[in-house]
Image (cartoon, grey):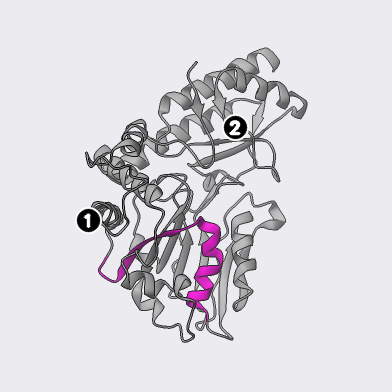
Amino acid sequence: MIIHNFNSGPSILPGSVLEEAAAAIHSFNKTGLSILEIGHRTSHFIEVMEEARDSVRKLMDLPATHEVLFLHGGATTQFMQVPMNLLNPGDTAAYCVNGIWGSKAAKEASFFGKVLYATNTSDSQHTSIRQPGELPAETAYLHLTSNNTVEGTQWHHFPETKIPLIADMSSDVFSRPMNYAQFDLIYAGAQKNMGAAGVNLIVVNKDLLARKKDSLPAIMDYRQHIAAGSLMNTPPVFAVYVSMLTLRWIIEQGGLYEMELRSKEKSDLLYSTIDKNPLFVTKVEKKDRSRMNAVFFMAKPDLEPAFFELCKKEGMVGVKGYRTVGGIRVSMYNALPLTSIRAFCDLMNYFSEKNG
């Protein structure tokens, strides 16, 4: 049976990446050593780290002002590390709360400074994106989550602001071309579009870090990680390697323009099937629909268990909605083939014919 992997993260990886990573576990680059065994300060791994960082610079077309880091953990660790590095006592940071992860990020920031809610869509169950209004000039930064994995919304037009702009891009990084240099700091957990869990990508404008006046614990200080080339301590070697392979795959496939074309084709097919099918409904405003995570529901909720049972039988994995939202969630990351979306849409139509 063919397995169609719609998991929201950790999620599907390109087949060629899995094959090469599996081979490297036994012998990395014909060294006779596993990628799990090589020293992180040897030339073997330094080459991996440099290719990964250079691939980010190439795909994002970054200026010299922006530095690339690969650090431990998932994006949740950045909820605290960002304000630790960017807020001085008495500073205020603005947060766009368009979903659960923006809310969690704002809560963590409140331990380090004042938090202003630039937008908050909780009153509409986070089914849309709202642009922030004018912010005080002294605001330290404006933070947003570019794609809301749980709620199924995505920023398609980013705020134009003179305030330093910060983005959690964990679930849509490298899925589309954009002006990445407009962001003063980007962070992203790797396990959706960029590799395996356990490593964070950080892209930061070095000029922004000069504002911090207080000293920080070394392991939390972006400036020290930059000085050490992401090798201040033992990095998550295997996770960085898988990210390097995944970034290499994106470049070989045609880069971000190709990723966006594929993303549009997959999401357009799925949303058109939902819209034409009265048995399935989405609450997300059309203009704000995510191309990465479609969140929708059964018009007849009592049919949901039968639909999930059919999905299981047909090898459709990871389609249950987030525990606080419920419903159905189909994640369409870069490595997901169009054939999986076609198969899922056929399944939806079949189920509707039997139960509509």
Q: What's the mark number on residue 237? A: none
| Viewer-nearest residue: 20 or 274 | 20
The part of the image, by quadrant, that contains residue 335 is: top left
> Of the residues under marks 1 and 2, which one precedes in the sequence?
1
Contact (CB < 8 A) between labels 1 and 2? no
Q: Amino acid at mark 1?
A: Ser
| Viewer-nearest residue: 225 or 12 | 225
Image point (51%, 69%), residue name = 81
**90 versus 81 height, above or below:** below
**Dot 2: element:** loop
Q: Distance between the Cα atoms at labels 1 and 2?
A: 42 Å
Q: What's the mark number on residue 43? A: 1
Query: Which quadrant is the C terminus positioned in?
Result: top right
Q: In the rendered view, does 50 fall on the left or right side of 115?
A: left
The reply to whether residue 99 is visible in this rendering is: no
**Magenta stretch: residue 135 in it?**
no
**Magenta stretch: residue 84 in it?**
yes
Mark 1 or mark 2, whichever is nearer to me: 1
**85 versus 48 height, above or below:** below
* Circle 2 crowding by C-alpha within 10 Å: few under 14, some 14–19, many from 20: many
The span shown in magenta is 63-87
Q: Label 2: which residue?
A: 319
**Dot 1: element:** helix
The reply to whether residue 239 is visible in this rendering is: yes
